[in-house]
Amino acid sequence: MKEQKYHLYLSEAECRFLVQNLIWFQNKLRREGHYTDAVDDLVIKLSKAKPKKIRVT
């Protein structure tokens, strides 16, 4: 079965807020001795995402 993809459209401020909180969560996981692989992947995806202009009506 094909995996379903989801698209998330964020403003610049929302994206910045999300990255800041992911980094905070990543640091928390490191302090507790847990793996941070999933959070690392999300931070990389957000940093590589191209801005896309959409029209909201």
Image (tube, helix red, strand yellow):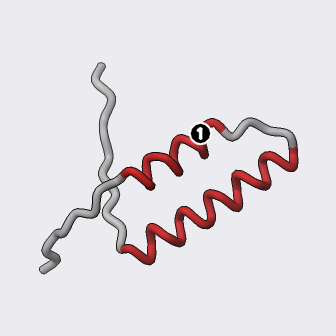
Provide residue 13's location: percent of width, then percent of height. 44, 77
Q: Is 42 on the left-hand or right-hand side of 36?
A: left
Q: In terms of image quadrants, where is residue 55?
A: bottom left
Q: Residue at the far right: name it.
A: 32
Q: Is 41 on the left-hand or right-hand side of 34?
A: left
Q: Quadrant of the C terminus?
A: bottom left
Provide residue 25's location: percent of width, then percent of height. 70, 56
Q: Quadrant of the N terminus?
A: top left
Along the viewing direction, whichever of 37 and 9 lies nearer the viewer: 37
Q: Is residue 18 above or below residue 12?
A: above
Name the residue at 31% across, 63% down: 9
Name the residue at 33% across, 29% down: 3
Amino acid on which the number 1 mark rests in the picture: Ala
Q: Is residue 35 above or below residue 57?
A: above
Query: Across the whole image, how many numbered discs are drawn on residues?
Result: 1
Along the viewing direction, whichever of 28 and 56 lies nearer the viewer: 28
Name the residue at 36% across, 67% down: 10
* SS at mark 1 in the image: helix
Q: Is 18 on the left-hand or right-hand side of 10?
A: right
**Residue that label 1 marks:** 38
Q: Residue at the far top: name it.
A: 1
Provide residue 46's location: percent of width, then percent of height. 44, 54
Determine crowd level at label 1: few under 14, some 14-19, many 20+ residues with C-alpha closer than 10 A. Answer: few
